[in-house]
């Protein structure tokens, strides 16, 4: 039986990964329940954990467990492993040897089955990664001294085969759990753990190198601990290690790290990043290893990168020399000596670090200051001075070629361009423009563009007029324009170059126009939208609105409507979600202008826009007010929407499969009807006009196209009635709605009314032992209202009575849970 139940393949794995969350909806379900599978797996784990039988004539239950585990796993495909994902930890405890043997056998194949589990990256909301429980199983087996070596080697082998990043659950992260010096997830003695690490390093040096870097981090991570549930492997574990054991492992691992680093500058650079975490002996060995390098034998870039890593470490600790965690000055001086040994002698390489990450450079400027609130203008000025001095020195030593070399090695070539622009040296314009703007060397092109922006900022718009741009190519003019802030004079430059260049400019533009002129904003938004970027145009209008620019109604309409044409593209869907709030603001502006009866606001265009962006109109800042208004005023519009959701038989045959556009339209209709809460016939004061409501309902009944449409209409109308106001005497719902229910009420309308009432409660909170007081109070209200309607409005009374009875039954259940202390949630 265990083989039949546990050996069943999960048919959901036949679906594409992104569709597996809906497996049950499409009939991809297992024959046997999860509870039965879990129970059998636990039974196997119990059998495997039993001590050996003393009576040799008695059949050993552990042998039975071993047979089943072997039969389930040995030589099986990835779907079998994936189908057993929830039971793998228990199977590992049932028979460690057979479990590990099955894995070892699988990994000898050219295409191992288990590596397929690591290719799956499931939805964080609806799915789960297939490999996680396999890692948990190996984590658990590491507690067994007899299995530690095999489990660790398998983890290293899987890590090497899959190359997973060390994020989330990965083989490398599991190895990190096992070998943490200060919190090892195994009971194996430290000497054996170190011996195993050295052994693993011989077979899997790259994996162990990454593992050592993680183990020697200054702030290592601590994740969920997996321990055996039935085996006694972890009974002697105390959760702590002696200081001597921790120091022993740290010393051994740091020594191993230096051995594995060898004379590889890239590895030595990585090792420097762990420097403060190393014991003193490890620091000495690492620095001695770097000092042993012969600089002239190394690639120039490797020397510079290693020197930069050392400089960054020294600057960081000198910046915070007042803290307890900062290394002492004698250690930092030794690091400086090593850096000077390895660093290239030329000024370009020695000054390249100044043109990179601002916050790393800031550590050098703010050295030794206690406050973290330094005046940034002072820091920026000091940085400009340091960069200017460096640029001057490079120019004096190597001339213009040195400046270009500096731009090419700098982490941020734009900072070099900025410094050159600020220096305003004679002849720089001609050296840079226009050729470097279109340089195939990406860093030189970036250098040139920031130079242009800096010169324009310093010299003003007159500077661009002094350039002989008529002699430039279209491509050079385009890149020049893209380097400048988007404004009218720049747009005129690209417009003179022809339609193709102008179109390319608007397609590539990444900055928003900051003009306060409505005409400039209209021009920018329209051109951006016309070149297939409507949601960047939305962002432009949103920024202008925040800067109090009065936006042209026609431009808002054009930009929002242009989104229809491109939304099928995945990147455009992402772009639309990024401007969620701006879309809501623009729609709200059109709604306000419609309410103010401005002539240029077309209600039908606005309704179409609201329908298209309905998903974004969630009340923050606005809802689909225009569509709701049309629903209240035009019963034919309501019926048209219902028909989209309930096509007739003939129409259903014609379109056996919905297009993506039809699917999106149906979803928006559903969202609209779900968000509609205002009863037809509502007056400005909130009361309901009875005759208007009944006329609306009569029109709906006449216009309904089929039976399913009438049923859907009644369900929705009933749900809207749940939002009706009270009468002046406190009874509910108002008389106009009660009259409508009596005249037009159907079973579907009553159902929609009752469900709508119960859905209105929403989230609620109560004490753990409160019982059903809240529900009983609600029930009393509905029973009272039902009694008030019983004579004149029996249909209404029946629905109210049902709701009251529901809450009364709910109150009794809550009383029982509160009294028995079983409540574990807040409502």
Image (spheres, rainbow, N blue to C red):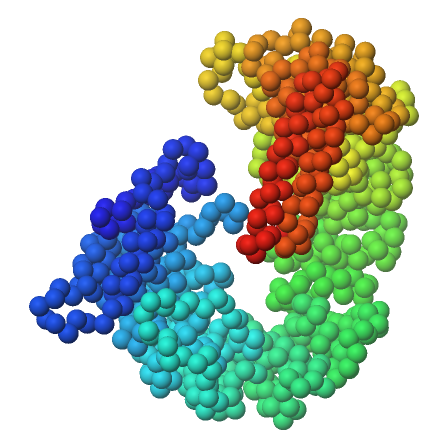
Of residue 764 and residue 93, the one placed in the foreground of this image is 764
Find the residue positioned furthest to the left.
Answer: 57
Looking at the picture, how far across and down is residue 319, in whole percent? Answer: 71, 81
Q: Please tell me how many numbered marks the rendered image carries.
A: 0
Of residue 237 and residue 74, the one placed in the foreground of this image is 237
Taking the image as drawn, is residue 524 in sight?
Answer: no
Q: Residue drawn at (76%, 40%), measured in percent from left and top?
A: 620
Looking at the picture, how far across and down is residue 17, in whole percent? Answer: 42, 42
Q: Residue drawn at (83%, 30%), measured in percent from left and top?
A: 730
Query: In which image quadrant can residue 778 be found?
Result: top right
In the image, taking residue 40 as reference, residue 241 lies left or right, namely right
Q: Residue drawn at (67%, 80%), measured in percent from left and top?
A: 315
Find the residue positioned furthest to the top.
Answer: 702
Looking at the picture, how far across and down is residue 600, in whole percent? Answer: 86, 21
Query: In which image quadrant can residue 53 be found?
Result: bottom left
In the image, taking residue 232 as reference, residue 633 lies left or right, namely right
Looking at the picture, how far across and down is residue 764, in whole percent? Answer: 68, 46
Taking the image as drawn, is residue 768 in sight?
Answer: yes
Q: Is residue 664 above or below residue 172?
A: above
Query: In which image quadrant can residue 822 be found?
Result: bottom right
Q: Residue drawn at (72%, 40%), measured in percent from left and top?
A: 777
């Amino acid at each position: 039986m265990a083989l039949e139940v546990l050996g069943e393949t999960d048919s959901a794995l036949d679906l594409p990964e992104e569709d597996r969350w809906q497996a049950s909806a499409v009939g991809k379900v297992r024959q046997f329940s999860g509870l039965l599978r879990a129970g059998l797996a636990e039974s196997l784990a119990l059998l495997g954990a039993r001590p050996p039988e003393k009576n040799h004539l008695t059949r050993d239950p552990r042998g039975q467990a071993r047979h089943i585990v072997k039969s389930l796993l040995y030589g099986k495909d990835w779907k079998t492993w994936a189908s057993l994902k929830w039971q793998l930890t228990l199977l590992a405890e049932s028979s460690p040897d057979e479990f590990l043997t099955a894995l070892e056998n699988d990994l000898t194949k050219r295409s191992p089955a288990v590596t397929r589990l690591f290719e799956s990256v499931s939805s964080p909301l609806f799915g789960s990664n297939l490999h996680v429980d396999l890692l948990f199983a190996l984590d658990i087996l590491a507690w067994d001294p007899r299995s530690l070596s095999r489990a660790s080697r398998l983890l290293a082998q899987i890590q090497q085969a899959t190359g997973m990043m060390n994020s989330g659950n990965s083989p490398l992260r599991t190895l990190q759990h096992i070998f943490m010096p200060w919190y090892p997830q195994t009971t194996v003695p430290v000497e054996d753990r170190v011996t195993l690490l050295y052994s693993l390093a011989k077979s899997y040096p790259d994996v162990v190198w990454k593992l050592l870097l993680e183990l020697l981090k200054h702030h290592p991570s601590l994740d969920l601990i997996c321990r055996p549930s039935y085996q006694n492997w972890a009974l002697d574990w105390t959760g702590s290690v002696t200081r001597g054991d921790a120091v022993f492992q740290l010393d051994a691992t740091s020594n191993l790290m230096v051995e594995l680093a060898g004379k590889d500058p890239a590895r030595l650079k990585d090792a420097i990043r762990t420097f403060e975490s190393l014991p003193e002996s490890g620091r000495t060995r690492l620095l001695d290893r770097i000092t042993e390098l012969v600089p002239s034998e190394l690639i120039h870039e490797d020397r510079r990168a290693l020197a930069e890593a050392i400089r960054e470490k020294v600057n960081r600790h000198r910046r915070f020399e007042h803290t307890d965690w900062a290394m002492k000055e004698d250690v930092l001086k030794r690091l400086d000596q090593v850096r000077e040994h390895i660093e290239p002698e030329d000024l370009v390489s020695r000054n390249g670090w100044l043109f990179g990450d601002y916050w790393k450079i800031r550590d050098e400027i703010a050295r030794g200051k206690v406050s973290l609130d330094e005046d940034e203008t002072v820091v920026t000025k000091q940085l400009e001075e340091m960069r200017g001095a460096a640029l001057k020195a490079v120019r004096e030593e190597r001339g213009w070629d040195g400046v270009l070399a500096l731009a090419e090695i700098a982490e941020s070539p734009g900072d070099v361009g900025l410094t050159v622009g600020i220096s305003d040296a004679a002849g720089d314009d001609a050296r840079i423009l226009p050729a470097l703007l279109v340089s195939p060397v990406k860093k030189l092109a970036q250098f040139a563009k920031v130079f242009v922006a800096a010169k324009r900022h310093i010299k003003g718009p007159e500077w661009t007029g002094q350039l002989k741009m008529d002699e430039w190519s279209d491509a050079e003019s385009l890149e020049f324009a893209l380097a400048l802030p988007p404004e009218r004079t720049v747009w005129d430059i690209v417009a003179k170059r022809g339609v193709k260049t102008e179109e390319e400019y608007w397609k590539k533009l990444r900055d928003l126009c900051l003009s306060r002129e409505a005409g400039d904003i209209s021009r920018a938004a329209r051109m951006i939208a016309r070149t297939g970027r409507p949601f960047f145009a939305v962002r432009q209008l949103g920024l202008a609105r925040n800067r109090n620019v009065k936006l042209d109604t026609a431009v808002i309409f054009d930009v929002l409507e242009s989104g229809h044409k491109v939304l099928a593209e995945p990147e455009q869907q992402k772009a639309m979600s990024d401007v969620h709030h701006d879309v809501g603001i623009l729609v709200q502006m059109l709604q306000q202008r419609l309410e103010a009866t401005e002539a240029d606001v077309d209600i039908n265009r606005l309704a179409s826009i609201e329908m298209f962006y309905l998903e974004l109109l969630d009340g923050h800042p606005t809802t689909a007010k225009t569509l709701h208004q049309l629903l209240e005023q035009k019963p034919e519009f309501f019926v048209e929407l219902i028909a989209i959701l309930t096509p007739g038989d003939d129409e259903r045959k014609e379109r056996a499969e919905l297009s993506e556009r039809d699917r999106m339209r149906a979803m928006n209709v559903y969202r609209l009807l779900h968000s509609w809460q205002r009863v037809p016939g509502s007056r400005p004061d909130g009361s309901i006009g009875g005759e208007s409501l009944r006329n609306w309902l009569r029109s709906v009944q006449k216009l309904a196209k089929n039976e399913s449409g009438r049923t859907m209409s009644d369900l929705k109308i009933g749900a809207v009635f749940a939002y009706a106001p009270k009468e002046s005497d406190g009874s509910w719902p108002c008389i106009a709605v009660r009259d409508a229910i009596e005249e037009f009420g159907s079973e579907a309308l009553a159902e929609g009314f009752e469900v709508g009432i119960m859905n209105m409660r929403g989230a609620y909170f109560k004490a753990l032992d409160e019982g059903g007081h809240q529900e009983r109070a609600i029930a009393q209200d509905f029973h009272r209202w039902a009694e008030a309607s019983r004579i004149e409005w029996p249909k209404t009374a029946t629905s109210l009575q049902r709701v009251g009875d529901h809450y009364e039954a709910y109150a009794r259940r809550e009383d029982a849970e509160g009294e028995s202390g079983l409540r574990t949630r807040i409502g």
